[in-house]
Image (tube, helix red, strand yellow):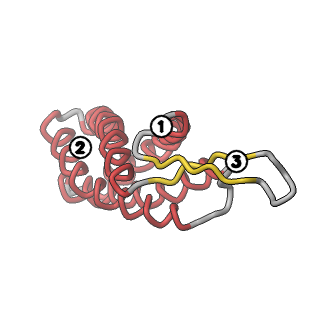
Amino acid sequence: MRSVIKGVTWRVIGTADTIFLSWIFTGNIGTALKIGFIELFTKIFLYYLHERTWLVFHIGQTKIIEPSSKHDDVQHIIFKDKHWRSLVKGMSWRFWGTLDTIIISFFVTQEFSKAFAIGFTEVFTKVGLYYLHERVWMKIQWGKK
């Protein structure tokens, strides 16, 4: 459930950014909203898969072993993210997100130049926004194991 909620909050930020960039490059708010609306659905699904994949790999995490309680011999393993993990996750997500944006933008505009302009500009805006989003979610304890 945490991954779903995290995906939705990111999608609100990401879709607003895509709509804004699409409007800048196409000059048409209707086209921008169309691109953003399609992306809303494709990227929620893609982000969910991306987040679940990153849960499997512990790259950029510190392994911490904690006892369950004073009267219990069971130990719990938790992983704490390092700052650079957020950056690497942002870069990997941006690859898939950019590819999705380019495909959707081309489908809507039928113009390679606009599709690539929107997609490649997103690389810069979204990496920064994603990093900030990750840092906020690291502070939210709800749903963590």
Mark 1 or mark 3, whichever is nearer to me: 3
Q: Determine crowd level at label 1: few under 14, some 14-19, many 20+ residues with C-alpha closer than 10 A.
A: some
Task: Tell which of 94 and 52 is nearer to you.
Answer: 52
Label 1 SS: helix
Across and down, in percent, residue 39 comes to 42, 43
25 to the left or right of 135: left
Tell me which corner region of the image, top left, top right, bottom left or bottom right, holds residue 82: bottom left
Task: Give the CA separation, mark 1 to mark 2.
Answer: 18 Å
Q: Which residue is mark 2?
A: 119
Q: CA distance from mark 1 to mark 3?
A: 25 Å
Classify 110 as above or below 134.
above
Identify the residue under disc 3: 76
Q: Secondary structure under badge 2?
A: helix
Q: Quadrant of residue 106?
A: top left
In depth, the one of 6 and 114 nearer the eye is 6
- Percent x, y of residue 12: 47, 59
